[in-house]
Image (cartoon, helix red, strand yellow):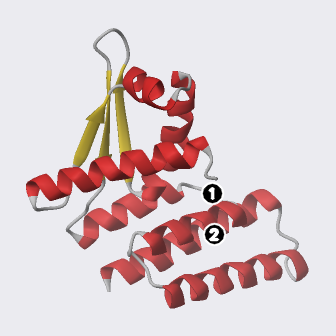
């Protein structure tokens, strides 16, 4: 049986699919009320918050806006960048100044799932990051902080290079 988080995520994805069918184009956003979704699934509104924070993130291609209060709403928007320069800016923003190996792998999997990179590109980038990490540990004795800075810079350059090519 699926977890409640997965069920709520599936429901929101179904809302996007219904919007796409109604418009005969990619849905740009869906709007819903936290309270209504919580009542539908018999959970507390904080569970909805958890799903939004963990499953509908910029790394996964979404921006979430919310307005609290009696007439509050949640608007979930798909990020779509038509221009390579816009995608490159998005990549630089989500990678940030430093990144851990785990976060880099998570980001690469997300980018592959969104079709921004393919499996081969993801694998090559992961191997490169792992190699740099091993060199930093064995040959150069680089601190973990500086290693995460170096990984972020390399990841941004590789992803932007692929995106702008």
Look at the numbered disc 2 and give the secondary structure of its residue: helix
| Viewer-closest of 128 and 65 | 65
Quarter of the C terminus within the rendering: bottom left
Q: Residue at x 20, y 67 (%)?
A: 82
Please tell me whether residue 24 is drawn above or below residue 55 in the rendered image: below
For disc 1, the marked residue is 98
Q: Residues within 10 Å of mark 1 (few under 14, many from 20)?
A: some
For disc 2, the marked residue is 105
Res. 43 image quadrant: top right
The picture places residue 57, in percent across and down from the top left corner, at 46, 48
Query: In the shown orientation, is residue 4 left or right of residue 61?
Result: right
The picture places residue 15, in percent across and down from the top left corner, at 30, 47
| Viewer-closest of 98 and 118 | 118
The picture places residue 125, in percent across and down from the top left corner, at 58, 82
Query: In the shown orientation, is residue 133 left or right of residue 160?
Result: right
Please tell me whether residue 118 is drawn above or below residue 96 in the rendered image: below
Residue 27 in sight:
no
Look at the numbered disc 1 and give the secondary structure of its residue: loop
Give the distance between the C-alpha atoms of the residues marked 2 and 1, in whole angstroms. Answer: 13 Å
Query: In the shown orientation, is residue 37 left or right of residue 146?
Result: left
Q: Residues within 10 Å of mark 2 (few under 14, many from 20)?
A: some
Q: Residue at x 60, y 86 (%)?
A: 123
Q: Which mark is residue 164?
A: none
């Amino acid at each position: 049986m699926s977890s409640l988080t997965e069920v709520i995520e599936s429901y929101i994805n179904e809302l996007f699919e219904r919007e796409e069918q109604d418009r005969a184009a990619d849905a740009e956003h869906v709007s819903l009320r936290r309270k209504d979704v919580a009542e539908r699934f018999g959970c507390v509104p904080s569970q909805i918050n958890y799903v939004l924070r963990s499953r509908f993130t910029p790394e996964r291609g979404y921006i979430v806006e919310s307005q609290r209060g009696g007439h509050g709403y949640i608007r979930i928007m798909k990020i779509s960048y038509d221009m390579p320069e816009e995608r490159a800016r998005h990549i630089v923003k989500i990678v940030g100044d430093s990144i851990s190996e785990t976060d880099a792998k998570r980001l690469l999997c997300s980018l592959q799932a969104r079709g921004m990179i393919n499996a081969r590109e993801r694998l090559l980038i992961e191997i490169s990051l792992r190699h740099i990490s091993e060199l930093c540990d064995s040959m150069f004795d680089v601190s973990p902080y500086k290693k995460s800075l170096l990984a972020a810079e390399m990841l941004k350059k590789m992803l932007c290079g692929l995106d702008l090519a």
